Image (cartoon, grey):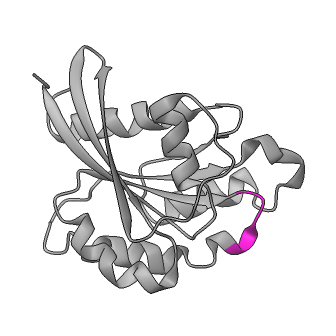
Amino acid sequence: MADAMFKIVFFGDGGVGKTTLINRYLTGVFKSDSVITIGVDFHVKKVDIDGKRVSLQIWDFAGEDRFRFLMPSYVVGASGGIFMFDITRYTSLKNFNDWIEIFKMGYKGDNHQMPVLMVGSKLDLEYKRAVSREEAFELAKKNNLFGYLECSAKDGQNVDDIFEEISRLMLMKAGLL
């Protein structure tokens, strides 16, 4: 039996690596042939975080414009969120404010802030970096997000760290840590 069950919603523009990151976390394998998500995909993983058994419901929300109107209904009941962008594609930050506003619509009326992390993907392509760590960190801080991390689904850098960090934040918010 789990000590806690949390719903995490991944969101951000299409092609930034949300599905690839989630698959790497769930299977430990990098798949370069992911197809675009239609609507939303749903996964479950049980993990131990600081002695607590946690069941994570991972919701992978499509990044295509045509699906954005659906997002607020998928955020309902979420315990945390992860906004993801591609560090090699500056335009993947262009819609940041829209994504955050759409995400917040799902928990409007909630007088406490849900933990949301900002994640920069494709760290293995550091040499093609278009968004500096400092700029991304400042954007996360300015928007009261709970942190900024970078990762690579390809080589596995920081993949587990992202899920551990969001899990800890949700456990703390729930008063379980």
Q: Which image quadrant is residue 54 in?
A: top left
What's drawn in magenta, residue-wise?
A: 87-91
Q: Residue at x 51, y 41 (%)?
A: 23
Left or right for 33, reference 141? right
Evaluate whether residue 174 shows in this view.
Answer: yes
Locate residue 167, reporting x and y percent.
32, 35
Q: Quadrant of the N terminus?
A: top left
Locate residue 68, reporting x and y percent.
40, 80
> Looking at the magenta stretch, what is its main secondary structure?
loop
Q: Is residue 158 above or below residue 170?
A: above
Q: Nearer the viewer, residue 41 or 138?
A: 41
Q: Residue at x 14, y 67 (%)?
A: 110
Left or right for 126, reference 168? right
**Residue at the farthest right position:** 127
Q: Nearer the viewer, residue 98 or 64?
A: 64
Residue 134 in magenta stretch: no
Q: Quadrant of the C terminus?
A: top left
Q: Residue at x 27, y 75 (%)?
A: 72
Q: Is residue 102 above or below residue 175?
A: below
Locate residue 90, reporting x and y percent.
74, 69
Residue 88 in magenta stretch: yes
Q: Residue at x 20, y 69 (%)?
A: 107
What is the number of callouts on the image?
0
